[in-house]
Image (cartoon, coloured by chain):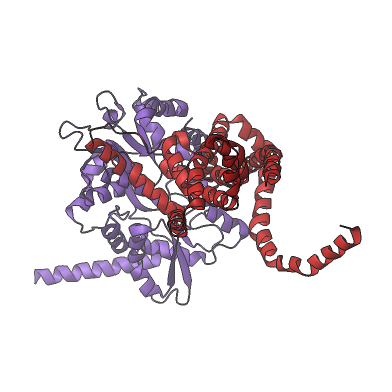
């Protein structure tokens, strides 16, 4: 591609398609950039010194505990989502159209119900006197502590976030040419080997896309850990809410938000090269 | 004949009183005809049957003054702060929790003008510089009668005694710190009442930490009520209104009133409201005996006018805290101390509820 050509296509882009992004851009600036800027600036300006809120954050043990916990829960939820979604998405990509429709509806219908409602449904299922424990008792088993545990939070968050994992996986898996599998088989490869050497690498872009979305969404979860978790499973967003809404400490709340944001970006930066490589690999295989 | 004279006498007396009151200042619950015609006031509270009952209590005020009353909510400190800071205050009268008007007096909430309010019928010691009470209620505990059909817990000492009464305890776990959580823990950790202050907050919280495995923290009133209705916890420390709500819905729990903690909601006026006089007029009307009777009957919370005599059913009556029997069992927290030490308390409490 020669230089003048690209610059003229750029100017064409500016006069045409770029204009179309203006409304979206205006909304983004208004509802995203401005509040975010305010939060960041307040985290630095509302304190005796510029860094006071940040020094407070890192000198308060509970903040560090909860920050680590937030990342740990997000990681576990992401892992469970991959394990559950992978076979499901695979099934979606290989079954006939009618069954596929049913499988898609099973993912989408709960997705249309608000997260709060689904979380409350989990409360009813998981609580000590809830459906699961009553069934266990009736069958002669002991009660299992589910609500107000990290297990409960993980179950609830996984269910809510599952569509975000299944959809990208399904999109990628549908695009995989199944004749490649047949080719591998006809060349004598064992099904396990076929899966790990042919299918899995081809599907990895979907895994990484879904995992990234799920992980980032999980980091910011608020309602589900609040309702399904106990003290030992509250996440950073809960602490932010306490600082801002209850204690009116916008500086500290802002600093917490900024730390979470930077940590998330840092994590993405670490994961990015890895992801690019995988994309290349799958591209090569294709 | 005698009756007639008496009636006449009392009529003259009440007329005389009214005249005298008019000369001296406002009378709680009395509103001048058409005094606020064309004006609009926004009243903010915590929603649910509570706010509905408060608005019902203000119906007479609305009819007489001609004001347009709008309801909004729920009360949120951050929203008040945003309004005060931007200079655009939309909330004229706000029902808040116990400490907020003291912690933010003169900043978020304005000092009340007591020449515009009649507080003569408000129970002793409940009026602050920036607030008058909105209602009284209790923080007490209930226990599961299925767990202890007889010889159940009878005091806070039993609540804290996990050996004598093994089982789970529901306690408040919301972000706003409550001083009585520390006071009760200290009193049941061997601290004498006389030595309570200055309070050792860490020791109080450590008392709770020592029984952590038995604790279940609730963050909303609805959650605490749900815990009783589903039988989730063996004992639960709740707002009295929620206890009553659960019993009404068939929860098999027994209230324990010994040393119930006196708590109240407050009526406040945020700094910078457009019509300060109208906001005061609303509060003055709200303090009236008739309004308080209506509020109590509709919400089951206790009135804050000593002349209010709500007619309520047996269950609601058993949850009214303004009776002499209940007053004799009441425990008063040191509101002033907790207001003065609110920052420290909040910080340590935040750590506790985050699981540290």
Instruction: Say left or right for B42 vs A12.
Output: left
Which residue is at a point 67% across and 47% down the rendered structure image?
A286
Which residue is at a point 29% across and 26% down the rendered structure image?
B161
Which quarter of the image is occupied by the N terminus of chain A? bottom right
Q: Colour of chain A?
A: red
Residue B256 image offset from top left, x and y in percent: 24, 38
Q: Is residue A11 above or below residue A213?
A: below
Instruction: Say left or right for A43 vs B240.
Output: right
Chain drawn purple, letter? Answer: B
Residue B190 image offset from top left, x and y in percent: 35, 22
Q: Is residue A1 above or below residue A276?
A: below
Q: How many marks?
A: 0
The outermost residue toward the left is B1
| In front of the other: A148 or B279 | A148
Which residue is at a point 38% across and 71% down the rendered structure image?
B62
Instruction: Say left or right for B56 vs A65.
Output: left
């Amino acid at each position: 591609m020669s230089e003048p050509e690209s610059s003229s296509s750029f100017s064409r882009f500016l006069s045409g398609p770029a204009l179309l992004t203006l409304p979206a851009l205006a909304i983004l600036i208004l509802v995203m950039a401005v509040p975010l800027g305010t939060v960041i600036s307040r985290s630095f300006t509302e304190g005796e010194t510029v860094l006071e809120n940040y020094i407070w954050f890192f000198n308060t043990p509970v903040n560090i505990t909860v920050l680590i916990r937030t990342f740990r829960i997000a990681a576990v939820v992401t892992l469970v989502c991959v394990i559950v979604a992978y076979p499901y998405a695979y099934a979606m990509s290989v079954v006939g159209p009618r069954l596929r429709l049913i499988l898609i509806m099973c993912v989408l219908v709960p997705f249309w119900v608000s997260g709060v409602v689904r979380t409350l449904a989990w409360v009813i299922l998981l609580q000590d006197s809830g459906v699961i424990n009553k069934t266990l008792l009736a069958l002669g088993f002991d009660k299992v502590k589910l609500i107000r545990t990290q297990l409960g939070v993980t179950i609830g968050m996984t269910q809510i976030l599952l569509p975000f994992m299944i959809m990208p996986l399904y999109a990628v898996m549908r695009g995989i040419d199944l004749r490649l599998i047949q080719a591998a088989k006809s060349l004598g490869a064992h099904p396990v080997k076929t899966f790990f050497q042919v299918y899995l690498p081809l599907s990895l872009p979907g895994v990484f896309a879904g995992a990234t979305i799920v992980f980032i969404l999980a980091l910011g979860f608020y309602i589900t850990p609040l309702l399904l978790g106990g003290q030992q499973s509250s996440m950073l967003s809960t602490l932010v809410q306490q600082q801002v809404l209850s204690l009116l400490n916008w500086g500290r709340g802002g600093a917490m938000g900024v730390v979470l944001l930077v940590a998330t970006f840092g994590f993405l930066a670490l994961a990015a090269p890895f992801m690019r490589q995988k994309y290349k690999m799958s591209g090569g295989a294709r | 004949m005698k009756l007639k004279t008496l009636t006449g006498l009392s009529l003259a007396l009440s007329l005389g009183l009214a005249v005298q009151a008019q000369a001296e200042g406002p009378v709680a619950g009395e509103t001048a005809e058409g005094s606020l015609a064309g004006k609009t006031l926004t009243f903010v509270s915590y929603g649910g049957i509570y706010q509905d009952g408060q608005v019902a209590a203000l119906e007479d005020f609305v009819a007489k003054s001609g004001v347009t009353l709008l309801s909004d909510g729920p009360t949120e400190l951050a929203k008040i702060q945003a309004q005060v800071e931007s200079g655009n205050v939309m909330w004229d009268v706000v029902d808040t929790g116990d400490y907020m008007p003291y912690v933010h007096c003169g900043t978020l909430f304005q000092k009340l003008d007591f020449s515009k309010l009649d507080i003569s019928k408000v129970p002793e010691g409940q009026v602050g510089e920036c607030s008058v009470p909105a209602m009284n209620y209790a923080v007490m505990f209930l226990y599961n009668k299925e767990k202890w059909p007889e010889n159940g817990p009878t005091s806070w000492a039993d609540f804290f005694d996990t050996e004598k009464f093994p089982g789970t305890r529901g306690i408040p776990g919301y972000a706003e710190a409550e001083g009585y959580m520390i006071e009760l823990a200290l009193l049941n950790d061997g601290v004498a009442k006389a030595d309570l202050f200055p309070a050792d907050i860490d020791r109080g919280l450590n008392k709770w930490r020592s029984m952590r495995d038995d604790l279940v923290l609730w963050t909303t009133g609805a959650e605490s009520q749900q815990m009783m209705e589903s039988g989730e916890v063996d004992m639960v420390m709740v707002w009295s209104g929620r206890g009553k709500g659960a019993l009404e819905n068939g929860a098999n729990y027994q209230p324990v009133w010994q040393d119930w903690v006196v708590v109240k909601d407050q009526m406040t006026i945020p700094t910078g409201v457009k019509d300060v006089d109208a906001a005061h007029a609303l509060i003055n009307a709200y303090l009236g005996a008739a309004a308080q009777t209506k509020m109590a009957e509709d919400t089951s919370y206790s009135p804050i006018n000593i002349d209010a005599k709500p007619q309520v059913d047996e269950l609601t009556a058993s949850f009214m805290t303004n009776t002499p029997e209940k007053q004799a069992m009441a425990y008063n927290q040191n509101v002033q101390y907790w207001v003065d030490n609110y920052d420290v308390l909040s910080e340590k409490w935040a750590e506790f509820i985050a699981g540290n």
